[in-house]
Each structure stands twice: as C-alpha cells, then as structure tokens.
Image (cartoon, helix red, strand yellow):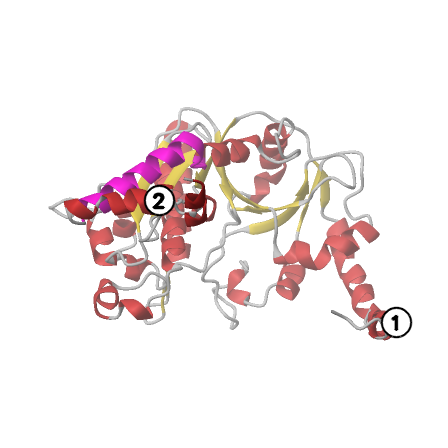
Amino acid sequence: MFDPEEIPELKKSIRDCAYSDRKLLDDLRLEVILLKSNVRVIKPRTTTTVSLVASDGGNNKLIYDPFYFQLVRVVDSNGNKLCLDTISPTTDTDVISAKQFDALGSPITALGRLMKDLGCETLNKLSPMIPSGKKMRENPDQVSKSWVLTYRDVCEWAVLYDKICYTRFATNTLIVRDGLLRSKIFNYISASKRALFIEMINNMNRAIEEAYIKDRIRIYLVGLAKHSQVLSRYSLVMQLEDVIPRGEPRYARVPFELEEKSYTWKEFIWRPDDDKSNQEINKFSMGHLYLVRFGKLNSDPIWAVDLLPTQSSSDSEIFGYLLADSINGFPVPHYPLCLQKAHEHAQVVGFDMDILQDEVIKAMKEIIPEDKREIIDFQVFNTDQSLNRYE
C-alpha cells in the first residue's frame, strides 16, 4: 500500500513524466497522418464466407486432469469438425508425427499433407517450438509444456492449408483466419534459406490461382486480429487526428514505414523488395496490413486485417465481403459473423465437457489396479473434504 504522504509526490511525478514525453505523442500524431491519404469507404458485397478456429485449451478446463490432456479440435463456421486429437505435454512427438501417415508413408490428415508438401518427416522439423521425439524420451523434464499450444496452432494452419489446396470450391469464397497472416512457429532452415511459412503461403497462392484458371472461382484469404502492434502504437493518435472519420465503414492500408516503427522484429513484416534488400529477410509474414472499421461511429472498434500481397489490389472488394458478414455480427458488433460462429462451434462446454471428463476418468481407471479404482471417484466427486463434516 502507498503511504498517504507519498501519493501527492507520486501524482506530481506522473504529470512531470507525461509532460516531458509529450514530444513522443506529437511525433506519433505526425506519423499517423500518412494513413489519411489511404482511407477508403467500404461498400457491402455478398459472397460465401467461412472461418476456421481451433478450440482454446485454456477455456476448456477439466475438473480432474492429472495428465494435463489437451484437446486439439479445429472446426469451421458451419460446425464441421476438420481436426480432432488429444495430447499431453509428455506425449512422444514422434508418435504424433507417425499418426499423420499410413503404413506406406502417405498422408492421411491435413497436418500430414502439409508436412509432406513442406518435406518434413517430423513435427520438430516443421516447427522448432515442438520438441523432438528423442528429447521427449530422454529429457522430458527439460521440455516446456507450452509446446502443446504450438501444436494446436500448427493444426489450425494445416487445416487452413488443406482447405485451400485440397478442396474444390463451388462458388467464390472468402476464408477468414482468426489472426494475422503471420507466424513465427514455423521453421527457418538457414543452410538452404528455406522459410517454411513462406513456402506454405506460396503453395496456397498457387492453389488460389489454379482455382480461378480451372473453374473461374475466386478464393480470398484474409487474417483478422483484434490486436496488433500497429493498433497499440497508433490507436490513440488515430482518434486525435480523426484518421478514420465517422459516417461510413472505412479501411486504410498501413504504410510500411509505420509497420517498421511498430514491430521489433523486421522479419515479421512483408516487404515487396525482400529479395533485393540487404536487411533481415522476411521469414514469418505474408500479409499487407490494413486497419478497418466496419461500424459508422468513431467509437466503433478498429480491427487489424492482413490481405495476401497477391490480392491487395482487390482490397475494396474483399472488405465489401467482410463488411456484409460483419453487419449482423453477434454478440460482438461489427465483427465478422463467420468468425463468431466458428468460435461458438469450437467451444467445448456443457454436455461436451462432461463427456470429455468422463472419458478421462475411464482412461485413468483402466491403467490402475481394479481394487484401487474407487479412489478416483472419491478424488473427482468429493474433492472438498470439508463437506464430509455434514455427513
């Protein structure tokens, strides 16, 4: 607790600091003026929209889970299950890798097809954040449990990749990813200068081009995020300078200069001259960044949206589709409905959670002696021992 005598001094110190750093705010206001010339009005257009979302393991807490099981489940906005797996932080990753292929080595899952196309026999070669099977077996105590979250994200990317590269679309379709078209979880092989993330996106670009050449079907891919470094840096001064005025839904392409001032890691920014530049090459980004407001008021939220560089020339058309999907957004207003539906279907709650918990209990009972199995029931269903005083 602050001493009451310290509070006046603390207040003065904060004010002095704010006034001394006022130049920083003034500089940001000058920088954000670059956005004004890029602001465009959005007009709604209709097309098929679909989103893919992985269940958030942090929101799916089991009552009793001694092995820290993680349910990896990816669904689309129509409720279709596209990936389902259960792992724990101690699962041998070589076993998981082998499950993606049949006995002849042919891929049988979306993740397997991605691994094959990128030339990765194991998950560790696909993502350095997933430990090798050897390390899992020999030094399990040195492995961070967070790798299961990386595996979930890899599965989400794999389903997105599979959807674009191995699905034949019947109509023009807008695919919305929950998050920007950037990721640092994929491997970069320095010896051959192979950025697996860039290769994956390039494969999707080729599939999008082939769909138009063969079937005259337009497939658009966007990544939408609630937060970004650019928004964090410029959100206040954008309001002060009225960069996106009220009255109509609007979007603005973010200049490269503003992105470079916002991101610490330059390889997280796509640049058109990466091949010729002597700077850090792009390894983890394949998106042109835009700031978008689907509402008409200054108080309506602004989202960060990535478009593929090959599709940014169609930005007005793409944002028109996104606007049409966002008009009826619920429960979050002015947010794409397809994303909200996908999140709703991805949740594991209520009866689904009861089923999952029941299976965990059954699995635990099968691996312990029969005469000890009742201990699990007591452990799970009577965890508050203090209630026994009422019996």
Q: Which quadrant holds the N terminus?
A: bottom right
The magenta segment is 346-367
Kind of residue at disc 2:
Val
The answer to whether residue 289 is magenta is: no
Residue 26 lies, with reference to residue 247, above or below; the image says below
Query: According to the image, label 1 marks what residue?
Result: 8
Question: Alpha-carbon distance for marks 1 and 2?
Answer: 52 Å
* Residue 236 appears in the rendering: yes
Nearest the camera: 208 or 30? 30
| 19 displayed left or right of 335 | right
Q: Is 96 left or right of 260, judged from the image as shown?
A: left
| Residue beneath disc 2 | 380
Tally of marks:
2
Amino acid at dot 1: Pro
Give SS at disc 2: helix
Q: Who's the residue at 32% across and 53% down the image? A: 66
